[in-house]
Amino acid sequence: MSSSSASSSSASSSSASSSSASSSSALSGTSSSGTPTSGSTGNRWLLVGGGLLLQFSIGAVYAWSVFSKALQDEEKAPDWALSKVEASLPFTITIAMIFVGTYIGGRIQDKRGPRVVALAGGIIYAIGIILASFSRGDDQLWLLIAGYGVISGFGLGVAYIVPIAMLQKWFPDKKGLITGLAVGGFGFGAVLTSPVAQWLISKDPAQPTKSFLWLGLAYLVMSLAGAAIFRNPPEGYTVPGYESATGGGEGAKEFSQGEALRTPQWYLLTAILTLNVSAGIALISVAAGSAEGIAGYSSAAAATAVGVLAIFNGGGRIVWAAASDYIGRMPSFAAMLALQGVCLLILPHAGNVALWFVLAAVIYLCYGGGFGTMPATAGDFFGVKNAGAIYGLMLIGWSLGGVIGPILISSLLGEDDNYTLAYTVMGIIALASVALTLITRIPKERKEAATVSS
């Protein structure tokens, strides 16, 4: 073959290779260097913004302690005057119903796509909140539970799982950070809602539930605006050059929901999530009352503190999730549980306003961190193809913890507010839970599949 012919052939081959790479990049939404681009897939970071808006609206559920305290006030709300246990029921039922929603929503979004499921979840959630606004006294506690607890809890679960599963598919290269951001908005939901709710309640303290009407309408607008732009990446979407350090790179086994349920790792991860939720939500469910009873906060200051603490709940989801990309998933959970345990043990003795807030902030930070880190952990362990169904089912840990934590601490507190007993028990549970993180490892099938493919 002549030199010119060889040169021509080489140029042709190079051109074809370049064309192929360009075509591949357009399909995947990335440049040839491996950096994701908008291309035919659009800007993937806009989807993060939509996810945050949706999560912010449904995350307002964490402001419940403001309503709980108002509903227990015998002087200002005599038609209600609920006991501690009664006042915890709507929030407890909400958290319990989340699992039902995430299970159904996760399965549907894996098949039908994220947009329709997120829109449906946001609408159902808002309807439940608005319905709760029509309850007018303790004889209508059932209506408050049905609206705020059952209906909005179900809608919350349906909407919650969608951005988590969707964004893991768009960001396989930033799995920990992106799932932290995906649920970060949920943790920040109470930041604005707590002071707004306190202001609305002050307009008619005899009927705290009236404020749910305006809040429900606001949640509806926010959730629909965020969910409207949701979509899955196109078939074959990849981030060239990306390879997971945990064995979850290209070629690694993608577990189905049934396969994941046949592994001990699924149950261990669910148990870790359950216990992390139980510890943190025990404080969250009675935060306003604890701030007043332990450290002497005023009602207004306690409501403000709950709102500010929500920043740590949201921030923890991002900080811990991002940190887990570097220090590992299980070491992160061990640190979260240990820190919560220590802070819960000290909390009932924190008569100083600043000390109480610092301890509570650490607990909120670690509680939120569990939700930010677990989706990425599940993705590492089982893959992201069926993330909606697998992690959606795993969120039964959220529902279990959401029932166990508030009921246990309300029972331990009793009518005499025995903070030492209540928080000591919860602290011991959190510290004992660290043991589970030491025995939980990624499934061998997933690591072996990744090794063979390489």
Image (cartoon, rainbow, N blue to C red):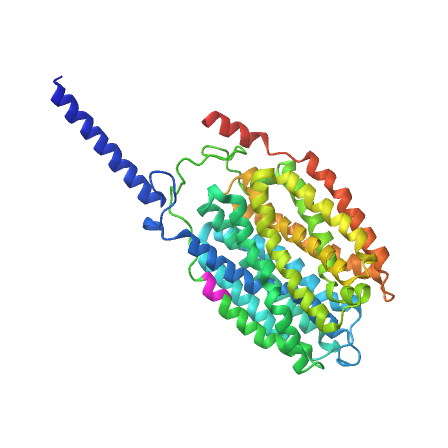
Locate the N terminus by quadrant: top left
The image shows residue 137, relative to residue 180, as above or below, that is below
Q: Nearer the viewer, residue 82 or 204?
A: 204
441 falls in the magenta region: no
The image shows residue 152, relative to residue 428, as above or below, that is below
Can residue 314 be spotted in the picture? yes
Image side of residue 204 versus residue 421, left or right:
left
Residue found 75% across the figure and 69% down from its top: 87
- The rendered magenta stretch, by its main secondary structure, is classed as helix
- Residue 70 position, x and y percent, is 73, 74
- Residue 262 position, x and y percent, is 62, 37
Residue found 74% across the figure and 74% down from its top: 71
Locate the C terminus by quadrant: top left
- Residue 178 position, x and y percent, is 51, 49
The image shows residue 248, relative to residue 397, as above or below, that is above
Residue range of the region highlighted in magenta in the rendering: 223-227
Which quadrant of the view contains residue 143?
bottom right
Can residue 267 be spotted in the picture? no
Furthest residue in direction top, as rendered: 1
Residue found 47% across the figure and 66% down from its top: 224
Image side of residue 424 versus residue 47, left or right:
right
Which quadrant of the view contains residue 238?
top left
- Residue 121 position, x and y percent, is 53, 62
